[in-house]
Amino acid sequence: MTATGHDQTDATTLDVSDLDQHMGVPMEPGELKEPVAVNDIRRWVQAMHYPNPLHYDEVWARDSHFGEIIAPQSYTVATDTSHGCSPAQVGRIPDSHLIFGGDDWWFFGPRVRPGDHMVCHRMPYDYRVTNTSFAGPTCFQRGDTLYINQRGERVALQRSTSIRYPVSGAKEKQLFSEPQEPEWTDEQLADLEVQKQQFIDQIQQLRHDERSFESVSVGDELAGNVLGPHSLASFTTEWRAFPMTTWGATAKGPSTVRAEELGYTKEMAGFEGDRRMERTNPELTDGAYYGPSRGHLQPRWAQHVGMPRGYGYGASMGAWIIDYVAAWAGEWGFVTHSSAQYRNPAFTGDATFISGAVVGTKVLRKGRHRVDVAVELRNQDHTIMAKATVEVELPSTSGRGHG
């Protein structure tokens, strides 16, 4: 989430003096113990509300371009042990908390398939401090995660932006001050299902066919989609779709640094990711019950960090964007780059409306054909939740593209 209303007034009052020593210094890689399993992929698309049979139905997948169930490109983040957060939160900022502000993804070609085993190499990139209407002096910090598979192939590079802010400032400003969830009538809920079906129909109608570059024009609109209304149950399902949240699942990482050493308030520090504590009391380490991540799933702790009620994950929002464009592109298309800014969280009770339109087409070198898609996420009150530009390669009738 990127809070609006930036200026430089009093931005220096946030103590970021510990950050410089970490910039550009490689961190310990992240690695899960187990290779990717088919049910990991199924669990992921279920949690991300992505009804593409290519990623969960073996009969559909057998007749596909790939001949088997493969992971959606959005699943790459689930092969890490910190969903991109670790290199974007190094260094101590006293009495602070963190939310996601955006992600850039570059995909290099290899697909993630069952049996793959990823090692994630991380490095802090940079940071800047500015004033925001959300919390006052705020640090926007970036870090890189490079995903490499067991064959030594680069699968993707993720550059995440974290927003590290003083908890006291967020509580004082109360930018988000609606603790009550909106009420939905039966008719409104039925209408959401109609809109969701239009997105599903787009996938079912294209099936295994190509969406060719020549069939696309600037101004074309993608079928809209709706996620939600979100709930503590749906956010919990998203969190549990990350294998890293399973007790004993990580071989390396996510970090050797405790949350309180990063400056989290005492109530939110905890033992999240602490593998030594995991051997004795794992409930303290997995984020849902105790520690920094519980603000998403426990309203009391959401309010402690300046949120009115339970709220969603930035990593999920990034996945929604990538999945949305990938569904339109079809199984012969390939997302090469996604650049997303998260502006407002998804709160419990809210619905997320996703729309997209083609804003550019280009023939690249070596016969590659690229389409640029602008994506926007809004809630039921038309508040912008995220904006993104996604670059996707499509096959051409004059030559085969990515597959």
Image (cartoon, rainbow, N blue to C red):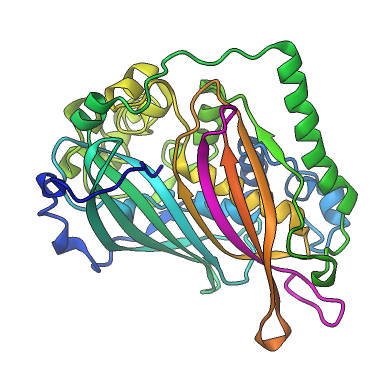
Whether 36 is drawn above or below 238: the answer is: below
Does residue 99 show up magenta in the picture? no
From the viewer's side, name the closer residue of 51 and 183.
Answer: 183
Residue bounds of the magenta highlight: 379-403
Q: Residue at x 34, y 49 (%)?
A: 162
In terms of image quadrants, where is residue 326? bottom right
Whether 241 is drawn above or below 38: the answer is: above
Q: Residue at x 11, y 49 (%)?
A: 12
Q: Main secondary structure of the magenta part?
A: loop
Position of the C terminus, as image quadrant, is bottom right
| In-image side of 302 versus 130 (left or right) | right
Where residue 257 sits in the image (x, y, percent)? 22, 47
In terms of image quadrants, where is residue 127? bottom left
In terms of image quadrants, where is residue 233? top right
Residue 70 seen by the camera: no
| In-image side of 138 versus 240 (left or right) | left
Whether 184 is drawn above or below 236: the answer is: above
Does residue 402 show up magenta in the picture? yes
Q: Residue at x 30, y 42 (%)?
A: 275
| In-image side of 383 versus 10 (left or right) | right
Position of the N terminus, as image quadrant, is top left
Whether 188 is drawn above or below 327: the answer is: above
Q: Residue at x 59, y 46 (%)?
A: 376
Q: How many marks?
A: 0
Residue 33 seen by the camera: yes
Where residue 76 sits in the image (x, y, percent)? 55, 55
Where residue 86 sits in the image (x, y, percent)? 33, 51
From the viewer's side, name the closer residue of 179 and 67.
Answer: 179
Q: Residue furthest bottom?
A: 366
Where residue 216 sits in the image (x, y, percent)? 80, 65
